[in-house]
Amino acid sequence: MDPVIILQAGVASGTVLLFATLGEIFAERSGVLNLGLEGMMLIGAMSAFKTAVVTGNPWWGIVVAVVFTGLISQIHAAIAIHLQADQVVSGLALTFLGTGLSLVLGEGLSKAGTISLLPSFSIPLLSQIPILGRIFFSNQSIMVYLGYVLFPLCWYYINYTRPGLHLRAVGEFPAAADALGINVYRLRYLYVLVGGMLAGLAGATISLAISPGWFSEMTTSGQGWIAIGLVIFSQWDPMRAAAGSYIFGALRRLILDIQGPLTIFGYRNPFYYNPYYGFFLQMLPYAFTIVVLVIGSREAIRKRMGSPAALGLPFIRGQRGL
Amino acid sequence: MKPKSLWQVFALIIVAVMLLAACKPAAPATEAPPPAEQKPPEAPTAEAPAAPPAEAPTAPPAEAPAAPAEEGAFQIPDIEEGKFNVAMVLIGPHDDGGWSQAHYEGLEYVGKNVENVHVAYIENVPEGADSEQVFRALSRKGFNLIFGTSFGFMDPMEIVAGEFPDVVYIHISGYKSNTTNFGNLFGAMEDMKYLAGMLAGARAKMDGNPKLGYMATFPIPEELRLGNAIALGMRKTCPECTMDVRWINTWHDPVIEKEAAASLFDAGAQVVFTGADTPAVADVATEKGKWGVTYDWVGSCKAERCLTAPYWNWGPYYAKITEGVRDGTYKVGWDYFDADTGALGLYGFMEGQTPTKGAAELPAEVLTEVKDLLAKMLKGEFNRFDVFAGEIKDNAGKVIVPAGEKMQQSDLDQFPPGAPGLECKYCMKWWAEGITAELPQ
């Protein structure tokens, strides 16, 4: 069990969570809760893989996944923003729609065989840094590097730019934003679209880079839900989201590698002597999500954590409210 | 809705969704429209998989996650009047490239080679209570013979078999039977795993890295038996070899299978075996420049770094059972076949196949030994009891089977002490010499 290898694999599989979490942060910061993440990721994974199989070019797969998933997310946007329906119900419906749609359109894709995937490479100088170079910069997929660029950009955009200020205003106090001449509806549509596109990117990252292939709903195996938990855990902050995503990615791999060694830090390794303990570890990310959501469901705590004040509330122009 | 109660509903729903997801590794979703040939024509009328999103749903949200648990989520195929109707229940997709696909092709074989028979299947059926509903619904529709192809279908099938005495149920891989209409069926895959272990041991020795890996699913006798067969074969061609184990707690999860394979390779394994359903292990092996041994399906050994694949050839045996059940000549009970039935295979070494590149490079004497032993198995001169013949030691050096003794069937598929009246002497709760892992107490 080499911690560097675990972290290296964790950064790779955490990239999927990172994209999905960043997308959900944008949507929630604008005040729209989108529980359709899991379904959108499946659509992204399926459409990316299908496109790559048909065209033979994984880059087209990324493009199609991002565009197609973005369009699908607009169903939720229309229901939640335009029709002002319950966002929880609509988001869940989107998950079911996405799961079903991806299964039907993905029929037969699991037999597609090997296709060309997104490239993996090492960054010349950076990979020479001891330990950190091996974890972050050697032999990673290009999507992992994209993740390194994306999360600081998102953080800067949300906190330090004018459009980011508008985004926060729309999510915190839409009536005031409206009075300032910001088009609340248009911005919310836009950020649900961004969220959908990033979810599509997360799905495409699974099927074209991290664990290539299409395996029906097993492809995402609940990572969309973990990402929703991570949004709350990260307090709607892209920096914390990145840390959380990479830690969770590493945990997936740790569960397997920890079964190997006889001793850990000089103690008998319980996971070696009793494989049943592995069940417990496997449960942890999901248990964590439940705990975070239960904590997050208390309004006082949620406020303290910095939840966007108008999250989940439809904005009705001209009506008094938040 | 107030934000607070909204959040509570939201949290509740997530908890419910995750509980459901955790209980059922394969979410039911829909019966995907089957491919063209010989499929039930009515299947395309499958219900829409999701709540229509175009309208704002007014139903209480708590109903949403409950829906997939219902039997209605599965499209139950219809029978054809006047024909002998055979149904198959699969745990994964019919085209998973492994276990389920091997069964599905066996069913296709029955449809093509047995006269006046109608075949149908349901895929992605989770083990447990949901499957009971599926078996009951199929029985009610009037199917004559139903195959259930996963370990966890055993108890549900036993219950439903008691309710429909005129339907014959054949369960693959378990250990129960009522000897009237609920039968057990499995085969001696340990034969082929033993041979594959010999090849893998020779390969690891040749590559100068005498370490194997075994990705095991659940700590049950079947997985221990197959793992031990690999280790016994490995020690025959490579006495210094050891084998590492990873438990993945699933039969079918391509993503976890990939991660577990990577974990074994990164821990130093040269050849990794999978006990799960998909060929992921060979893909990872190709990536890492090592070797993978896939399982279950003859077509699974496609990747460049696939060494071989022990596989099932269910077709002829299923056809025999179908004809036997129809004529009333098949004796329902515990049916365990060996390699001489032709229902087991070792990819690259059966008639009309050529060894993979990785296997062809092995020393000639190893290849001859494997081929000779395979020929003996196919003739029925060497069977599973010869694989588990003494002297066998466990990985702590304790003698499990003394020299001159052989394990019996009750030993091969049971933990101690075994079922009442069927007690085992040696039992299958040990790891063979060379396996660097422990078992739960």
Image (cartoon, rainbow, N blue to C red):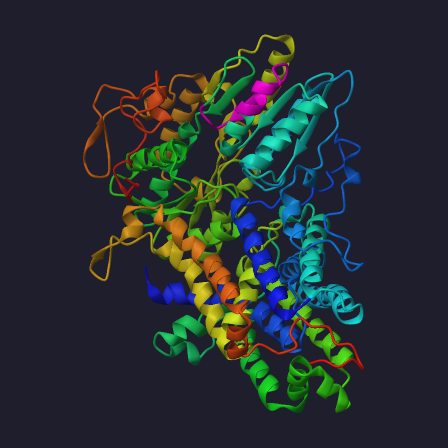
Question: Residue B249 magenta-drawn?
Answer: no
Q: Residue at x 23, y 26 (%)?
A: B391
Image spot of residue B211 (x, y percent)? 31, 48
Q: Start and end of the magenta stretch?
A: B158-175
Q: Quadrant of residue A146?
A: bottom right
In the displayed structure, A129 sits above or below A283; it is: below
Q: Quadrant of residue B372?
A: top left
Q: Residue at x 70, y 46 (%)?
A: A107
Q: Residue at x 71, y 21 (%)?
A: B142
Number of numbered discs visible in the structure rendering? 0
In the displayed structure, B34 sits above or below A102; it is: above
Image spot of residue B118 (x, y percent)? 72, 23
Residue B108 visible in image:
no
Residue B242 visible in image:
yes
In-image side of B94 versus B411 (left or right): right
In-image side of B332 versus A262 (left or right): right
Camera-nearest residue between A283 and B321: A283
**In the picture, which quadrant includes the N terminus of chain A?**
bottom left
**In the picture, which quadrant includes the C terminus of chain A?**
bottom right
Camera-nearest residue between B237 and B36: B36
In-image side of B405 versus A207 (left or right): left
In the displayed structure, B170 sits above or below A29; it is: above
Image spot of residue B71 (x, y percent)? 66, 37
Image spot of residue A44 (x, y percent)? 66, 61
In the displayed structure, A167 sits above or below B148; it is: below
